[in-house]
Image (cartoon, grey):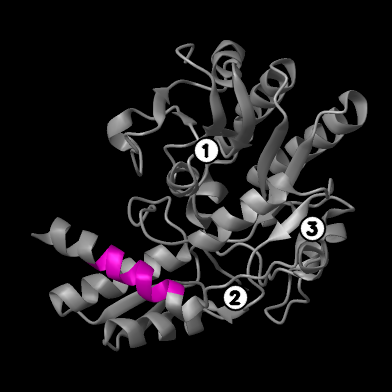
Amino acid sequence: MRDKSVDVLVAGGGGFIGGHLVGDLLRQGHSVRSVDVKPLHEWYQIHPDAANVVADLSLLEAATQACEGVGQVYNLAADMGGMGFIENNKAACMLSVLASTHVLLAAKQAGVERYFYSSSACVYAAQKQTDPDVTALREEDAYPAEPEDGYGWEKLFSERMCRHFLEDYGFATRVARYHNVYGPHGTWDGGREKAPAAICRKLAVAAVTGREEIEIWGDGEQTRSFMYIDDCVQGSQLILRGDNVEPVNLGSSELVSINQLVDIVEDIAGVRCRRTHDLSAPQGVRGRNSDNTAIQQWYGWEPSITLADGLEKTYRWVYDQVKTHAA
């Protein structure tokens, strides 16, 4: 990591969002240091033009080395996954606070110009998410605090750390609250996948095997909004460069139920499946949507990719993985 100075550090660059972000930054001509704790063969994408480093950023020494000679930092490093993972791995999710804190501290000490932290819609108060017809969540709805247990508390705490580093040290921190990011080159199997990838996988399996049945977690009436990865990457860079210092939603306001999500992917896959519902499976909050008023006012931003278009790209990629795995 001491070989040369680089424009940008992407912490968590071996992850789903990180891999897409590194690729986009390289296409713009930036020099990028991509750091992740996973062995290289487990990275979602490896970009040969980046300085790819395997290091544990929960350790202050590794975080300090990662931030040396860097102009900007995107901190995406976290141990996380879909609802099945975060409900059953609360301690692991909370331990991400070590990387969140140490990268922030190291970036400040290294004189980094701008620091971006990827927070989550899981910081929002549970009492405001009890109805499928949920009122879209505004940034102020994070308080009084009642976030998702484990993962949400870590994210909210790390948001406050960014705020106080800005207030106490004048360190330029920016925070985005991601709402359900999906797309190709992400987790699609194994327990960490989120709803769009899981449904794409189940319907791809149905298409490949001819067993046209699908299990849905819960009754399928729980609602969410989903943001395609390209919009996430562009929005993150916009927020890093911007002047707003408050946490801001980064997501789609296109609310759908999980049953409707299945409908869309069925149309893309060209199959119709018999549905069963596992009411004992992890479901999370009953409804969650992003109020994009603030990001529209501050940045004039709105997602450019519809759910149907994004799911088609995602399904085609997941289908190829399923078919290859089956072969």
User: With 81 as the anchor, is 191 left or right in this view?
Assistant: left
Stretch in magenta: 310-319
Relative height, residue 80 to residue 84 (above, below): above
Which residue, given by chain and number where applicable, does mark 2 sit on?
222
User: Foreground mark, 1 or 2?
Assistant: 1
Q: In the rendered image, which residue does mark 3 sit on?
A: 125
Q: Earlier in the sequence, mark 2 or mark 3?
A: 3
Q: Secondary structure at mark 1?
A: loop
> Which secondary structure, mark 2?
loop
Side of 114 relative to 67 (left or right): right
Q: Is residue 215 left or right of residue 8?
A: left
Callout 2 amino acid = Gln
Does 190 lie within the magenta span?
Answer: no
In this rendering, the label closer to the viewer, 3 or 1: 1
Mark 1 and mark 2 in contact? Answer it, CB < 8 Å. Answer: no
* Residue 79: numbered disc: 1
Residue 42 image-quadrant placement:
top left
